[in-house]
Image: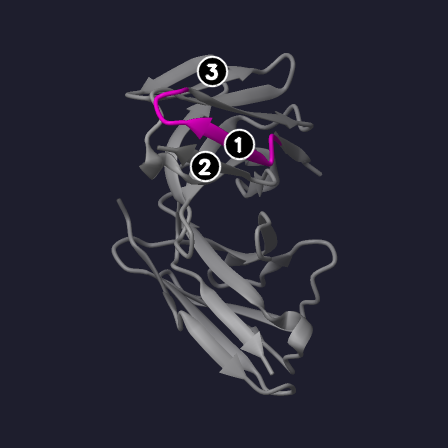
Amino acid sequence: GAVVSQHPSRVICKSGTSVKIECRSLDFQATTMFWYRQFPKQSLMLMATSNEGSKATYEQGVEKDKFLINHASLTLSTLTVTSAHPEDSSFYICSARQGGGNTEAFFGQGTRLTVV
Amino acid sequence: GENVEQHPSTLSVQEGDSAVIKCTYSDSASNYFPWYKQELGKRPQLIIDIRSNVGEKKDQRIAVTLNKTAKHFSLHITETQPEDSAVYFCATGAKAAGNKLTFGGGTRVLVKP
């Protein structure tokens, strides 16, 4: 299957700093990528849909100024957690789908963010 | 928006027995129903999916059934093995919703040897 690579896999940062997470589709082009947040032993909560060349579409309740998404190319989307606080500590995971329509979503390996 | 409910939240079965997980959804426009398996500390991976024009699909020990009228779909795992132990998520997708997936709450399956 297609490969989605996410980096870093783990990051620890201080409160007030910003953290950038990268999501890359390695062997296919993805016009749309999705960013999720997963709390321990809970489900995947969609944060936003990242659209190549245009603004991201955020889900209700997700602060777009705090979670900046940039989809600069067909193979790269980035999520920047700005002015991070301990409550932002979580597992962030991206996914991408090959082609349009309802097809298999391939997930990155996720990023464990810890804000101290 | 779409709401997906998944039951049970935990499921313990004896090796060799069957496991069944059920999901219900609210959006009648949903037409894509994948199931993902997530092992501890790893990324979710697709194990089977079904589209709305099909009522049942099988892949070796795994099968999914869909009842569009009742808006529910189920995952069936037969002859369970210890390596089936993981968290399983159902999801729905709809073209009208930009093809984004809405996930159920997950089921933690433990297969006891």
- In the rendered view, tell whether residue B28 sits above or below residue B112: above
- Range covered by the magenta-colored residues: B7-17
Q: Earlier in the sequence, mark 1 or mark 3?
A: 1
Q: Secondary structure at mark 2?
A: strand
Q: Amino acid at mark 1?
A: Leu
Quarter of the rendering containing residue A73: bottom left
Residue B53, numbered label: 3
- Mark 1 neighbour class, 10 Å CA radius: few under 14, some 14 to 19, many 20 or more: some
Numbered disc 2: what chain? B
Q: Can residue B11 be found in the magenta stretch?
A: yes
**Residue under the image location 63 percent in, 12 percent down:** B69
| Spot occupied by residue B91 in the image (x, y as percentages of width and height) | 54, 35
**Label 1, on which residue?**
B11
Whether pointer 3 and pointer 2 mark residues with C-beta atoms closer than 8 Å, the reply is no
Q: In this image, A35 relative to A28: left or right? A: right
Residue at the limit of the structure toward the right, as seen here: A61
- The quadrant of the picture occupied by the C terminus of chain B is top left
- In the rendered view, tell whether residue A98 sits above or below residue A70: above
Given residues B74 and B108, the one toward you in this image is B108
Q: Secondary structure at mark 1?
A: strand
Q: Secondary structure at mark 3?
A: loop
Numbered disc 1: what chain? B
| Spot occupied by residue A47 in the image (x, y as percentages of width and height) | 61, 57
Q: CA distance from mark 1 to mark 2?
A: 6 Å
Residue B110, numbered label: 2
Quarter of the rendering containing residue A72: bottom left
